[in-house]
Amino acid sequence: MAHDHRYIIILAGGSGTRLYPRSREDIPKQFQKIIGDKTLFEQTIDRILLHTSLDRVFVVTSKQCIDLVHRYVPTLPDSNILAEPVRKNTGPALACATALILKRDPDAVIASLHSDHIILKNDTFVASLESAFDMVDKTPSAIVTIGIQPTSPHTGYGYIERNGSHIDVNNTSVYKAVRFVEKPIKKVALDYIRKGTFSWNAGYFIYNADHFMHEIHAYDPAMYSIVTRIVQSYGSPEYDTVLQSEFEKFDVCAIDLVLMEKTKDMYIIPADLGWSDVGSWDSVANLLDDDALDKNENYLEGLTVPIDTHNTIILGQEKKLIATIGLNNVIVVSTDDAILIAERGRSEDVKKVVEYLKANKIDHLL
């Protein structure tokens, strides 16, 4: 199959509450500069353009983030953007985007990727992606995922187990996936690492669009019916109205639970991508290069005066001084209207701050 039937769906609709206060409702983490001088979304686009052209890229985002998509990728056609009226997780987002691409190209093969991850080894990523596409071209009933080589017994990620035998595709080993496992406890995660046959689930999936929709029909006929009504209205004056009314009918559901954990022909390419889902400020800290730290192992950004401060991350601003005295092992993040101060190792709890703000209707700080 020619490469001109290959497409990329970039999921860019998440809220990223664990990177508060940088990540906000109106500017979530994928549109923030977390590491480097480009946003995570821009980095994702740059990475994808190593493999394909922009006309093959489709972005799924929330209605409030459409202007941000246009700001960072001004040449992306409007017809390549699906604006979710409400957030319903990755199941409805991928099903709708896939069906819309399939309507244009009955031979479409698609890779669905996330816009809020960091990948340091772009060449390895592109090689894995191309091998996954080739695998699906040869076996249209296959769904291939790119699994992340674990670097620790992380309990915040899902895992995918593979069997021992593999298929060679372009010098890339492709394994049959045995099972998906939800976030394990530490003891179980340690056992997975020792076995060496488990990968972290990054949520990257490559598949034949027609096969994907047949699987959606088989495993979630209600979702398939809603998607069908949306796609049938595409291009008509009623499309926006239908999209709004029908999208609200979707259950909130991840594509893993809807399809990927159930499909019978799932394969995995384990890969060391230098990957992070940037799911917390601690994960950001772990990405920092040693050369970026000062003599006291601090990472400093903005106008800072660290006195007797060690092993601390300070993400400030040039217009506002942050002075610290006697801090050790702390993360400080400052924005125009909020400051976060957290012990390193506790940044997963930042989502509790967001929950508090929502519960107490302090909406202007969300």
Image: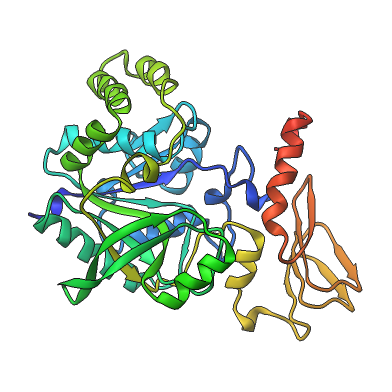
In the foreground, 137 or 298: 137
Number of numbered callouts drawn = 0
87 w.r.t. 246: above or below:
below
View extreme (right): residue:
325
Q: Is residue 207 left or right of residue 114?
A: left
**Residue 250 falls in which quadrant of the image?**
top left
How was this image coloured? rainbow
Q: Position of residue 165 (x, y in %)?
A: 21, 73
Position of residue 288 in the picture relative to residue 328 (left or right): left
Instruction: Check the picture and name the quadrant holding the N terminus.
Output: bottom left
| Horizontal side, residue 297 vs residue 8: left or right | right
Front residue of 56 and 208: 208
Seen at 19% across and 36% down, the residue is 214
Residue 365 in view: no
- In the rendered view, would you say 123 is above or below 318? below
Query: Where does the image place residue 195, in percent across and percent down from the top left?
Result: 41, 75
Q: Quadrant of the C terminus?
A: top right
Task: Give the image location of residue 14, x and y in percent.
Answer: 51, 43
- Which one is nearer the viewer's eye here, 96 or 31? 96
x%, y% of residue 308?
89, 79
- Residue under the point 79% across and 30% down: 360
Residue farthest along the bottom direction in this orientation: 295
The answer, for residue 19, to whether it is visible in the render is: yes
